[in-house]
Structure formats: C-alpha cells, structure tokens
Amino acid sequence: MSEPTTPARTAPAPSTPGRTTPEPPVTALPTARLAAGRAAAGRLLLRGRTLLRAVPRPSARARHVIALTALVLAATWVYARLGLVRYDLYRATSLDLTLFDQMVRGFAHFSAPTSPLRGFTLDKGMDFNQLGEHFSPILALLAPLYWIHDGPETLIVAQAALFALAIPPLWVFVRRALGTTAGAYFVVVAYAVSWPVARAMNFDFHEVAFVPLITAVMIERFSAGRHGHVLTAAAALLLVKEDMGLMVAGFGAFALVRGRRFDGVAYIVGGLGYTLYARGFMIPGVGGDPEMYWAYGQFGPDVPHAAAKAVSDPLAVVGTLFSPQVKIDTWGFLLWPTLMLCLLSPLFLMALPQLLERMLSDRLHWWITDFHHSAFTVVILLCAGADGAVRLGRWLRRRRDGLEERHTALIWAAGVCVVAVTLVPRFPFDQLIRPEFYEKHPDVVAAEEAVKAVPSGVVVEAVNHVGPHLSARTTVLLWEDKPPVAPWIVADTARISHPWGSPDRQRDRVNELKLLGYQVVFDREGYVVLHRPGATPP
C-alpha cells in the first residue's frame, strides 16, 4: 500500500533589499467550525443579557438611600479625621475635651457625671457634678460607647457621626419644600461643608453635636404633619442644654404663625418654663451656680431688670445686637450662606432666641465665629432659607407668568452650595488638604514622652493641650497659676496655654514648683514633668 503523499512546501523566495516580504496567507477556518463558534458566542451573549435583565434595578428610593448613606459616611470620616488629627498632634484641649470625657465616663460607670477638672478650675472640689454647669443629661446616651473604647477619641468620633446624621432629615425636608431632588442634594452638601460645622469639629467636643440632628428631625416632622414625633424631638432638645428651652419657645412661635395655635402656645410655655426650672432648681440642686452664665450685666443683674431695660430703652438694646463690628461680621457669616432668604421665613423665629442670647451678651467668645456656638442654628437657618426661597418663588410667579417656583428654588440651592464651598478656605476644613496640618514636629514627640512619664491611676495637673492624652488613665486637673494640689504636674514652658498669660510666667511657675519640693522627672522641648514624692492627692 502506497504512503500518502505530502504536498511539497515551496521555499520562501529570498528577500530583496528595499522590498517588503509579503506575509503568508492565513489559512481560513472551515465553514462548519466558524458557524459553530458564532452560534456559541450568540448563546453566551443571550445568556448574559438574560442574567442582566434578571438583576433588579434599584428603585429611585433605593438610589437616594445609597447616595445619602455615602454622604453620611463621607462626612463622618472627614469630621472624625479633622478631630482625631488635632487630638493626635496635641491640638485638642482639656477645656473642653477632658471635661466632657470625665463627665461621660461617670455616666458609663453608672455614677455621677463629675468633672474633677472643672471642679478644680471653679474651686468647687473634685466631686463637682458637671450638670451643675450646663444641664446636659442627653450626654448619657454616649455612655455605652465608652464600654467599647474608654477615651476622648470616642467623643470625637461620636460627634462626627452625630453631625453627619443630620444630613438625611435635612435632605427630606428640603426636597419636600423645594420640590427638587437636585436642590436637596445641593443644600445637604452646603450643610456638610458649612463653616459652623467646621468650627464645631475643630474645637474638641460639645453638647451641640446633638442639635443639628434633633432640629432637622423637628422641622422635617413638622412639615410632614407628624406632630407626635415633633414633640418627642423637642423633648430631646431640652435635654441638650438648659437654654434649649429658648429654642423650643422659638419653634413654638413658628408653629403659631403656621396656624398650630395650641402646639405653639404649648411649646412657648413649655420651653420657657423648662429653662427657668433648669436654671432655678436643677442646676443649683447638683451644686451649680445658676448665675454663672448671666452675661447681660449691661442690662441689669437678672431677667426682670434686663426686661425693664429693654422696655425703657429699646434702641440701646437693638444697638447692642450690632456693636462692636465683630457682631456685624458674625451676622453676615450666619445669614449670607442662605443668600439672606432665611429672613423671609417664619422658621427664622426658631433660631432667633439663640442668636439674641449670643449677640446681647457681654462675652466676646459668644459673638465671634471662632468656636462652636454657630452650629446650634446652622440647620435651622438652612431650612428657613429653603422655605424663604419657596416664598420668594411664589411672589415672583405672581408677577411674572411662566416662571416656575422649582427653577427659583433650584437656583437658590445651587447658590447656597456655591457659597458654602467658597467659604471652606476661610475655615478649618481647609486644613485637611494642607500637608503641614499632618506634620509631627519634635515638640509633639516630646509631649508623647512626657505623657509616658506619668504613671497611671494618679492625679495630675496637666497643661491644657496635654490633659486629653492623660484623661483615660489618670485623674486630670488643669495646670493653672494657683497653689498645686496634685502630686504630678505636666507643664509647658515654651508655648502659651490657657489660662496662662505668657510662657515667661509658665517658666517662673515651674521654678516656684521646684522650690516647693517638686522634682523634675522629664524635661524636653519645653515640656516638664514634675513629681513631689509623698504628696497626698486631693
């Protein structure tokens, strides 16, 4: 049987310089195999399309839930990042982070919310009940978090989450009020980056952390007609601080204007009554001084005299609202982020008592924008601005046919967002994009070593910016220019610190402590740790 013949292969032609050798022809697949491949690919494509159709698309509601959740998580991360970096780099302070840390720790241990630090500064003793300064029992809600992590960092993260949680109810109210979803997102972004929130997160921790969330819920539930929920939120607001009764009374005035007469009168009477009761009975009942925060001496020694002054000389009282110049600046920073339209809404009445409380006082740190005080009203003013924008849109539509209210509302919301973003560089959120904000200098390393030199379980007087790092494992008092009472002291002789007037005086005080028997156990970069053997803690 003959062998099958193999076709002879033709040798490639030699290449000629300057010519391109042609590629050999590609052998075509058999027609049957090509058809089978195309059929298999078609079946796979059809199966993929079927699977995609089987996956349910998220509803509009689900998409909004996802978007708002992302916003809340992002805001929480940014806020916590700002606070924790400041804490890690010794920029947080005992007044007020250590103060609240001691208070919440008392709640967490099922004991009185005492603050030895505040009692020491007020000369009221180590067992001073912090509710005697500000009546804020709502802080007990944070106690379970201390069972997870017992330290000031817990308060920083909790505050970040509370501020961020105001975003969903604010979004719901603004969307309902403006009638535009895009506008609602513009406004919540404006809130998230707003300067009052930035100031609050940049200044340790305060009870104001609860207020944006509660006020957002109050306003949104009122607009939804769920007045039982409003009452619950109002009761929670009263527990934030003794003067929140004034805000509840302002909300009552708003309810009156909106036609809820019985509710309005009840909120006004209940709010004012609660504030008077808290100042007159609750605060003194736990050892506090109800007159500690009377800051209206220019009008009289108490409320009746101040009221008489307002009646007899109203122009002087009104003038106090705008003098000195710094008050006008603060008014501008409060109202301009709403494009001034908050003034067109009766909801502004809810914020008015707290604004008057600040601007009529004789205390500079209440007037200025440097601290946390403006965060009490940030949500209220934004909601009032949204309501004002709607009212302006209705007015314009009556005068110009074809102009839709929704367009006016959307323009306002976009403008509010732009204003909020443009203000970011003037306030603390701007730090987060600056590399120098995260730099760890030699003085921070020295502060860490100074903290390590103090044993756990002792009583220590610590300079203001070191106290928070000792609070979780020692009893921290504030290092002040007064006779020492603690066996351990952490001083700073290089940087001025509250309540000292100058580093020179701080250095002199360290020398005086040495003469009183304190021994230096650590000294670097201006940080000095002193110990007096045999000293009995207070």
Image: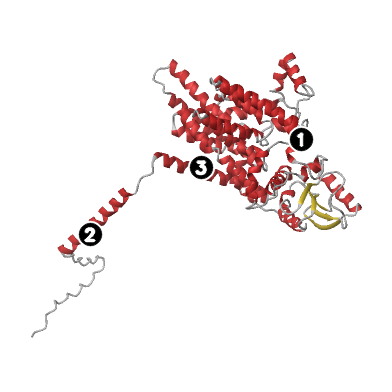
- Earlier along the polypeptide chain: callout 3 or callout 1? 3
Helix, strand or loop at label 3? It is helix
Q: Position of residue 435 (x, y in %)?
A: 61, 49
**Mark in the foreground, 2 or 1:** 1
Q: Residue furthest left?
A: 1
Point 68% across, 26% down: residue: 273
Alpha-carbon distance for marks 3 and 1? Answer: 43 Å
Instruction: Provide the secondary structure element on which disc 1 rests.
Output: helix
**Which quarter of the rendering shows the N terminus?**
bottom left
Q: CA distance from mark 3 to mark 2?
A: 45 Å
Asked whether the residues under the numbered discs 3 and 2 touch, taking CB atoms below 8 Å apart as contact, a structural biologist would say: no
The residue that label 1 is drawn on is 285
Choose between 26 and 238: the one closer to the eye: 238
Compared to residue 483, the image places residue 400 above or below, namely: above
Q: Nearer the viewer, residue 279 or 2?
A: 279
Label 2: which residue? 40
Where is residue 508? Give x, y as percent: 87, 47
| Residue 437 seen in the current view | no
The residue at the point 64 percent across, 33 percent down is 238
Number of the label disc, if any, that sits on residue 71? 3
Amino acid type at image mark 2: Ala
Q: Earlier in the sequence, mark 3 or mark 2?
A: 2
Q: Is residue 444 above or below residue 163?
A: below
Q: Quadrant of residue 420?
A: top right
Q: x and y percent of residue 520 in the render?
A: 84, 57
Label 1 crowd bin: few (<14), some (14–19), many (20+), radius 10 Å:
few
